[in-house]
Image: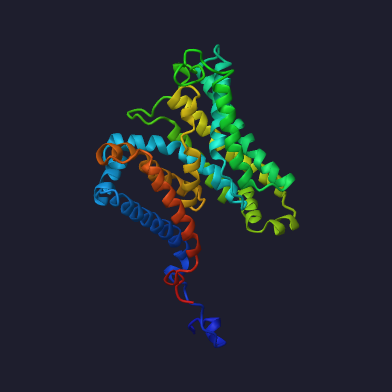
Amino acid sequence: MTTDAVDPAEAVGVAPAADPGFLQRYGTTIEYILIPGAALVGALAVFGVFVALFGKNPLDLYFYMYQGAFGTWFSWQNTLTRAAPLILTALCTALPAQLGMVIIGGEGALLIGALSATSIALAMPWAPPLVVQIAMVCAGVVGGGLWITLAGALRQYRGVNETISSLLLVYIGLAILNHLVEGAMRDPSSLNKPSTREIGAANMIGSIPGTDIHWGLAFGVVVAIAAYILIYHTVFGFAARVAGGNIRAARIVGLGVGKLILTICFLAGGAAGLAGMIEVAAVQGRTNANLAAGYGFTGILVAFLARQNPLAIIPVAILLGGISASGGLLQRRLGLPDASVQVLQGIIFVFVLASDALYGRIGFLKGKS
């Protein structure tokens, strides 16, 4: 004799739990895509109005921006080349954000990383190129890492706000760069633009075969993937996120918050320092004022648009790299200043910050209760 199985919940008159709907399951993920996307579109619309006030057609603006960023293979290569340092400098903001810290000193770490890498290369003229390149990577990572660790140490041991200290360290790093490039490390033959001596063509990092995109892009993608695994798939990353959610509770349960802060800051600064090394070894071939191109500051915008997610940083960096790459075409075709894309980036940043208040407040994304 067989009997039909009876749901225990039905046997006692309790309705079974309803299966959560699609929006309840993925509402947060949709928010993380929809809200930054809407902020980006809104910023482009406002920038279009701004351009229209100067007698230019906004539709032409958007067309040439697309052409300059993604319209041709040459444009794509230019975009991806610019995206490489943005990925790494964005990680300089995104990693400390897991601990609730706001670090905006990626530009300074990039400059110190570049100086460190150049110094070690010039000190090893006798070494094989591979040895020099590995030494440059190590020097760039350590130099940038220690620079941002200084901001973390000031926060941990002296209670100094890390946002202010990391920003001030940018200007200190720039002053050190100018002092050394125009003084002790200056190449006497660099007359119009003070620079260090060249690191040597043999020590330069080449391009990915079949392209003009240097290997720095691969470095950035690999480091971003490694950062994602570290934060979301390791005990260390879990501890960092717990401390970022409630630092007092983390201390109560015995987590070494100070160690977490210093380690995260070193890794964050190391990423930006690696970006500086790549700019020297793949683009400039030496250290000069051209390194202060604003990659560290744009990286802050990339990190915020990506919601501090290391994997999301990759496509966002490509998008922002494309906007930056389109500046030259906008200047030639529409007569806009090359710096107009920086105005757009500023507008995007304002919209991203303003849109932060919308998270968790969009009714249709909450699903049925």
Which residue is nearer to you in this view: 96 or 160?
Answer: 160
Q: Residue placed farthest to the bottom in the image?
A: 13
Instruction: State whether residue 159 is above or below residue 218.
Output: below
Instruction: State whether residue 25 is above or below residue 103.
Output: below
Where residue 216 appears, as percent x and y from the top left, is 45, 32
Q: Residue at x 25, y 51 (%)?
A: 59
Dividing the picture into quadrants, the one containing residue 323 is top left
Q: Residue placed farthest to the top in the image?
A: 126
User: How many marks on residues?
Assistant: 0
Q: Residue at x 42, y 47 (%)?
A: 345
Q: Residue at x 44, y 25 (%)?
A: 284
Q: Residue at x 52, y 81 (%)?
A: 7
Q: Looking at the image, can residue 356 be seen? A: yes
Where residue 212 appears, as percent x and y from the top left, is 35, 29
Which residue is nearer to you in this view: 139 or 49?
Answer: 49
Left or right, 156 with respect to 135, comes to right
Where residue 37 appears, as percent x and y from the top left, is 39, 56
Instruction: State whether residue 266 is above or below residue 239.
Output: above
Left or right, 82 with respect to 53, comes to right
Q: Residue placed farthest to the front in the image?
A: 54
Where residue 176 appears, as percent x and y from the top left, is 59, 28
Q: Looking at the image, can residue 279 be seen? A: no
Q: How is the image coloured?
A: rainbow
Left or right, 25 with respect to 44, comes to right
